[in-house]
Amino acid sequence: MSENAAIKILICQGTGGVSMGAKEVEAEFERVIAEKGVSATIGKRCDVIKTGCRGLCANDVLVDIITEEQGRITYDFVKPEEVENIVNEHIVNKTTLEKRKAKPYYNTFVDQQMRVVMTGCGQINPESLDAYLAEDGFKAVEQCVNQMNPASVIDEVKKSGLRGRGGGGFPTGMKWSFCAATPGNLKYVICNADEGDPGAFMDRSILEGDPYCIIEGMMIAGFAIGAEFGYVYVRAEYPLAIDRLQMAIDVCYEKGYLGQNVMGLGFNFDLRIKKGAGAFVCGEETALMASIEGERGMPRPRPPFPAVKGLWAKPTNINNVETFANIRHIILKGAEWYASLGTDTTKGTKIFAVTGKVKHTGLVEVPAGMTVRDVIYSVCGGIANNRKFKAVQAGGPSGGCIPADILDTPVDYDSLIKAGAMMGSGGLVVMDETTCMVDVARFFLTFTRDESCGKCVPCRIGLKAMLDILERITEGRGESTDIEKLLEMGTTIKKASLCGLGQTAPNPILSTIKYFRHEYEAHINEKRCPSNCCKELLKWEVITEKCVKCGACLKACPVDAIKWEKGQVAELIKEKCTKCKSCYDACRFMAIE
C-alpha cells in the first residue's frame, strides 16, 4: 500500500457470513464511517468491501482490515455492536484490538494452504467486474484467442496435467480433445455445479466468491472445442451462488464479455443458468443432461459418451466448477507452472471441505499430495476436544474410510483409491473415538439409497437390502452371516450398476469392513457398540472410575435425567433418560457408557 492508499475493510459474505449477520456488519461499518467522518479525520478513504467465503466459516463474521501501519489484521465473530469500537480503535487510533483478533490458529489455517482456485475468494468483491479485471480477469481468454489457437489451448491444458475435480479425475485436456475432434457445428459446454455431497460446499463458495472466473474458464473451453453455448447447472438450494453468478452473467452481456463477438475477439459465446431440483443423481453427467433437456434426471448408458453425443444429442463437454476455475491460472501462468504443483499423477491443488470431529472446520486448498495427517493436524488443528483420531471419510457419501494407521496417505487420486477411498469432489469427514463405523456406513448408505434414481435393479434393490442388514446390526439383531453378505452384495452392486452412484455407493461399507471388521463383529456377536454410539446397544450408565465430577453432563441434559452435586460422581436417572446422547457428547472423559 502506498502512503495515501485507501484502507480496506473486507467482510466475508459467503453463505456462512450472511447467515451470521455479515450484511448488518457491513451496513454498520458504512454508517459509522460516514457519520463520524472517519475518512476526513484520518485523511484516507475507507473502502468497505464484501467478499466471498474465506474458508473458516465457523468463525463468521470475519472482518479483515488492511492498513499501511498494521498490515492485514483479522477479527472473527464480529457483531454489529462491536463495529464502532473497532473503527475507533483500529482505524482512527491505529491500535489493534488484541483480545478481538482472530486467534493464532486462523493464521495457521490460512498460511498452511496454497490458494490458487480460491485466490479471489475472500479477497475481491464478487459482484464487481472491475474488481475481477483488476486481478487480470479475462486476460486468459484474450490470450487464448489472440496468441493461441484451439488446438494449442487444449495442448496447454493437457501439459498442465489438470484432472477433473468433480470426482472421476479424468484428464481435462483429453476430454476437451475428444469433444473438439467430434464433427458438428453445434456443441455445448456445461459446468456441473450440482454439488450434492453432504458437508461439501467447495463449488458453492467459488460461485459465490469468484463467479467471473467460472465464466472465463467456460469461455476458454468453448473456444477450444468449438462451442458457442454453455450451461451452468446449479442446484436451486444455492440461492446466493445463483444470484451472484446471474449478476455476473448479466454484467458480462452488458459489457460485451458474453454474446456475439465477445470482447471484439471474433468469437461468440452465450451462457445460461439451469437450476437443478436437488437430486443427488443429477451430479452424474448423463442424468444432468437429461435434466437440462426437461426430462427426469436419470443416467443413460455409456457409450456414447457426452463428447460424442451429449446434450440434445450434440457433442458436449462437462467439467465441474473447480476444474473450470483452474483454467485461467493455467493459461496465464503456463502449463509448466501448474504441473510443478502436486504429485506426478495429480497436478495442482485440491480444495477440501473438512467437517466432523476436527477443531477447525472449513474449506482448505492444499497442494495435491499433502498427507491426510497434515490436512487434519497442521491445517485444521487436530481432533476436537483432544480426542483420539479414528478415521476420515474421503470422497463424500460414496467414498471410503481411512483409518489412523494409514493417516499419512497423500491426498491424490491414486493414493486414496489404493487406500480404499476416493478423492471425490473433495469432502473430508473427520471421526474420533466416539464414532461408530457401522453407524457411519449405515448413515451414508441411507443417503445414497434415498438418492438412487431407481433405474437399475442392482442400485434400487441392492442398496435397500444392504441398508436393511446394517440397520439390523446397529439395533443388535445382526446375524453371523451378515458381514459376508454385505461383502458379496457390495461387490456385485459395484460391478452391475449403471452409473457412478451405484458403482460407488457400497464403498463406505466395504472400507469399514476392511479396516473396522472388529466393530461389526462386536455388534453381531457381543451385541455391543465399542464406540458407545448405537442407542439400542448402550447401557446408559456413568462409569465411576472415569467420572471427574465436573458436572458437564448435567448442563447438557435437556430432560433433567442427571443427578449431580459438586465433588460427587454423576448419576444417570434411567427413568427420565430419552437416550438423546447429549450427556455422552458433552463428556470429554468417556465416562458415560
Image: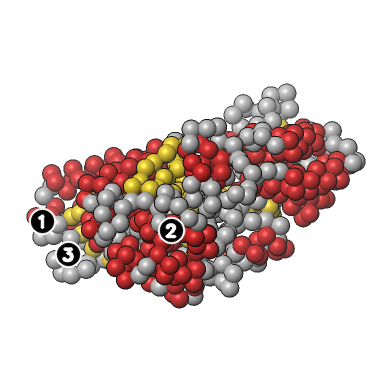
**In the orientation shown, which residue stands out farthest toward the top?**
575
For the C terminus, give its image quadrant: top right
Image color mode: secondary structure
Q: What x and y, as percent, mark residue 248? A: 30, 47
Q: State the separation of the CA atoms marked 3 and 1.
A: 15 Å
Q: Which residue is mark 1?
A: 41
Between the residue at mark 3 and the residue at mark 2, the CA separation in whole angstroms equals 43 Å
Dot 2 falls on a residue whose secondary structure is helix
- Quadrant for the N terminus in the image: bottom left
Q: Which mark is residue 389?
A: none
Q: What's the residue type where badge 2 is placed?
A: Ile
Q: Which image quarter: residue 465? A: top right
In the rendered image, residue 94, in percent from the top left (x then y), is placed at 22, 61
The residue labelled by disc 3 is 5
Inspect the image, locate mark 1, and give the three-letter code of the amino acid beneath it.
Thr
Comes first in the chain, label 1 or label 2:
1
Dividing the picture into quadrants, the one containing residue 169 is bottom right
Residue 225 numbered tag: 2
The residue sitting at 48% across, 55% down in the picture is: 183
Name the front one of labels 1 and 2: 2
Which marked residue is nearer to the observer: mark 3 or mark 2? Answer: 2
Estimate how packed mark 2 is, as few (under 14), some (14 to 19) or many (20 or more) residues with alpha carbons within 10 Å. Answer: many
